[in-house]
Amino acid sequence: MSLGCTFPEALNKAVQSLEIGVDALDGSGRAQPVRRTQPAASLAVPVADRLFKVYRAIQQGIPLESIARETGYDPWFLGEMQVIASLEKRSESGKQRTWRVSSPILSSLLSALCQKIGFADAHIARL
């Protein structure tokens, strides 16, 4: 079931419900680690894992216009996926910090990841 208050939340829930061992848009999960490949060469081919390749292309900084041209995806959807990627990057940048449980920054970040973006608990733990 992929119901959510926002598109990013619904998309993340849809990925988690695929039952292929993946719980994140980058293609990672309990069953497999993330594969860091160059996605740009094969974005035009509609295959089962193209959504994951598109997300990895966004993470790598490939311009959204280029991805939209290759895939035919609407730029709005790509922009929403970029929001997810930027929040994920923000949470990864906090790995070097020692967080206090009562930290308001940590609280707002976890709230955004869980409630607004819909990341799986296992994905948050990996971040």
Image (spheres, grey):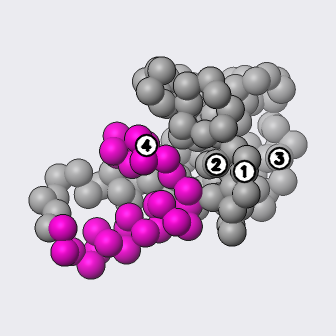
* Earlier-in-chain disc, 3 versus 4: 3
Q: Relative to 27, does residue 104 appear above or below in the rendering?
A: below
Residue 52 position in % (x across, y down) = 63, 34
Looking at the rendered structure, the kind of residue marked 4 is His
User: Contact (CB < 8 A) between labels 1 and 2?
Assistant: yes
Q: Give the Cα distance between marks 3 and 4.
A: 25 Å
Crowd rating for badge 3 (residues with CA inside 10 Å; few <14, some 14–19, many 20+): some
Crowd rating for badge 2 (residues with CA inside 10 Å; few <14, some 14–19, many 20+): many
Q: Give the Cα distance between marks 3 and 1.
A: 19 Å
Residue 118 falls inside the magenta stretch: yes
| Segment colored magenta | 101-127
Q: Which residue is mark 2?
A: 13
* Earlier-in-chain disc, 2 versus 3: 2
Q: Is disc 3 placed on a helix, strand or loop? A: loop
Residue 21 falls inside the magenta stretch: no
Q: Give the Cα distance between marks 2 and 3.
A: 19 Å
Along the horizontal axis of the image, is 90 left or right of 87? left
Q: Give the Cα distance between marks 1 and 2.
A: 5 Å
Looking at the rendered structure, the kind of residue marked 3 is Tyr
Q: Give the Cα distance between marks 1 and 4.
A: 17 Å
Q: Is disc 2 placed on a helix, strand or loop? A: helix
Q: Which residue is mark 1?
A: 2
Along the horizontal axis of the image, is 61 left or right of 96? right
